[in-house]
Image: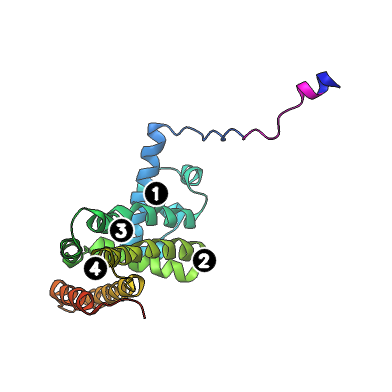
Amino acid sequence: MADSAKDSPDLSAPLAPARRPRVSAKGEQTRARLISAARTLLAGEMSERFTTRNVAALSGVTHGMCHYHFQDRTDLVLAVVTDIRPEWILPLEEAVSAPGPFAERAERVVELLARSEGTELSHLHSALHWHALNDPRVRECLEEEYRRWRACFVALFQVLAEERGADLEARLLGEAVAAAVDGLAAVESLGTDVDSGPVLRTLISTLAAGAGPRT
């Protein structure tokens, strides 16, 4: 009995993490080419032809190799969502989290958002929204990205709350600015000439001036 107990595994010990398969440098390059091709198709006039077969053809790899890296078309869309994060969410997070008082951080945010988004990124967002309407996995992923994006504005007003030593409605103020930014982006996507910088600067400063403690 003693020998049996000694030889039995210790079930209380933590499990060793499963090893992830190593991806070769060539494999990473192939994956990057597939994502780049997916971006091209989604952002271009051929978005209706967005299939794994067409992505593979555009990237110059076999259809089978495409499915080696991505199970289906949805996986490719999700990869594009992750791929564009450094182009719109990460800069906003950095603008808010960098040192400085509320006014300085707010100005960094305004200057960042006042820049033109670029045609490709604008078209990609439109295509991703369309896929989100038709694919629950894309919708869930995109919703999480926008929650992270809106959290930047909430964090900005939390800085204001800390400066004033008051319990401000940082979430509501941040969500209000995020909604305004969405609205400006929608107007600009229609080709309307709107100078978003002064609009956002006025909105943020007005909300900050009138912000009071929770009631």
Name the side, left or right, on which 162 lies relative to 10.
left
Q: Which of 91 and 101 is in front in this view?
A: 101
Label 2 – label 4 distance at C-alpha: 42 Å
Q: Is mark 1 on a helix, strand or loop?
A: helix
Using the rendered view, name the quadrant where residue 40 is placed: bottom left
Name the side, left or right, on which 58 lies relative to 92.
right
| In this view, the mark in front (2 or 1) | 2
Label 2 – label 3 distance at C-alpha: 22 Å
Q: Quadrant of the C terminus?
A: bottom left
Residue numbers of the magenta segment: 5-14
Q: Mark 4 points at which residue?
A: 164
**Type of amino acid under label 4:** Arg
| In this view, the mark in front (2 or 4) | 4
Residue 109, label in figure: none
**Type of amino acid under label 1:** Ala
Q: Nearer the viewer, residue 20 or 45?
A: 20
